[in-house]
Amino acid sequence: MEIRQRDNAVVDRLSGAGDSEEFSVVLGGPLFQLFRKAHLSGDALELGRQRLLLVVTLSWLPLLVLCLLQGTALGTTVAVPFLHDIEAHARFLLVIPLLIGAELIVHQRLRFVASQFRQRGLIPEDARPRFEAALASTIRLRNSVLAEVAIIVFVYGVGLQWARSQHATPDVATWFATTEGKLSPAGVWYVYFSLPLTQFLMLRWYYRLFIWARFLWQVSRIDLRLVPTHPDRIGGLGFLGGATAAFAPLAFAHGAFVSAWIASRIFLHHAALLDFKIAIIAVAGWMLILFLSPFLVFSPQLARVRRQGERDYGPLAGRYSQQFDDKWVRTDKAGEPLLGSGDIQSLADLANVYTVVNTMRTTPITRQAVIQVVASTLAPIAPLGLTMMPLGEAVKLLFGILT
């Protein structure tokens, strides 16, 4: 009841004439409400350090304690002691904190998106009910109890079986299992709690990204008041390009996960970095699809606006150019001073306007956004390049190139 009343209040604020800053794909759901009641989060995701400490304490610290007790944290008791397991540390000390910390960044970056559609006059008056319905639907899905319960059921129904198959029968004895598949006490906590927690947090982000993509799709079904002469060269949707920066921590988290997976095979199984080039390309491509493809829903409408702009401004530019040519080139204007005439400036202004229309992009995806997503994904993988060339040789090579 409390959640529903809060949702209704937010919808009322979003539907009114006031600001739409309450829009968020993060501030909601049973886990968020649980954190609020436990004083681990405020209404705007405050107390992030407390949440990070709690999650790391529950996922990583018990593994360390149990391994210390069973003597598999270090030493030669098993082939892979806990403190040598790169994947485990990256998953619980890097990926999980990134998934938790990204919530505040995504909330702060995306919260103004809804208000921008309204403040920039992109929503026609007769389409406001549809826009408000999209906002209300987004909030309901964001706060869905059923969705998070379904994620938990999926994690323990499907993800747990996958975890058992991937981690319970290692080729060599590890801190979490023997070669016969018997889990150690640390392995039990690892397979039945720590891994499911990671899977839950990741799948919850995928659900949020689905909500975000669905909201953009619903807005793209509205006949927006896009202008082909807008200086951002995207009809007025340039503000969407800045939203991609919000997903950089999530891209980094995916890259860190893949980097740890590759590193463990390089250092423990003597593989080479180039053996995983397909996996590296695949994760970078997946990040581009995951974070940038939702913006493509605006492409048909942007393409239509550009075509209409070319049809409207092309004849206008042609008529003015012909009249300018007739006045200043085809006839004798010796008695009329050229300096001080506004015709030339008007021609230049019209040329600039037509250039904006003619170069209008049909997608709000910018080159900067692509570079940002790819760089964030590959950043944690890049240090593995040192496995192919020692740092000293790499520095000498770079110095030689630059000099």
Image (tube, grey):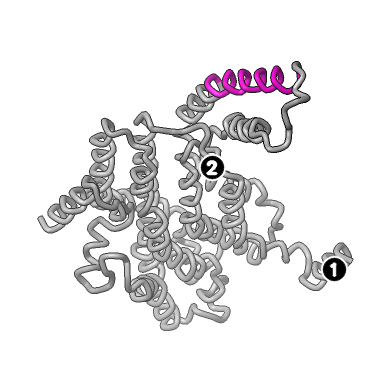
**Residue 120 image offset from top left, x and y in percent:** 39, 43
Residue type at tag 1: Phe
Quadrant of the drawing holding the N terminus? bottom left
Q: Which residue is mark 2?
A: 232
Image point 38% across, 72% down: which residue? 52
The answer to which of 143 and 356 lies nearer the viewer is 356
Quadrant of the drawing holding the C terminus? bottom right
Give SS at disc 2.
Answer: loop
* Disc 1 crowd, CA 10 A, few/some/many (<14, 14-19, 20+): few
The answer to which of 31 and 158 lies nearer the viewer is 31
**Residue 58 image offset from top left, x and y in percent:** 34, 72
Give SS at disc 1.
Answer: helix
Image point 18% across, 49% down: which residue? 12
Image point 33% across, 56% down: which residue? 26
Is residue 223 covered in magenta?
no
Residue type at tag 2: Asp
User: Where are the magenta residues, as a range?
Assistant: 311-329
**Residue 177 image offset from top left, x and y in percent:** 45, 66
Image point 36% across, 71% down: which residue? 48
Res 34 quadrant in image: bottom left
* Disc 2 crowd, CA 10 A, few/some/many (<14, 14-19, 20+): some
Residue 17 in sight here: yes
Is residue 325 covered in magenta?
yes
Most frequent secondary structure within the magenta stretch: helix
Q: In front of the other: label 1 or label 2?
A: 2
**Residue 17 image offset from top left, x and y in percent:** 24, 47
In the current view of this chain or complex, which residue is farthest to the left?
A: 1
Q: Which residue is mark 1?
A: 399
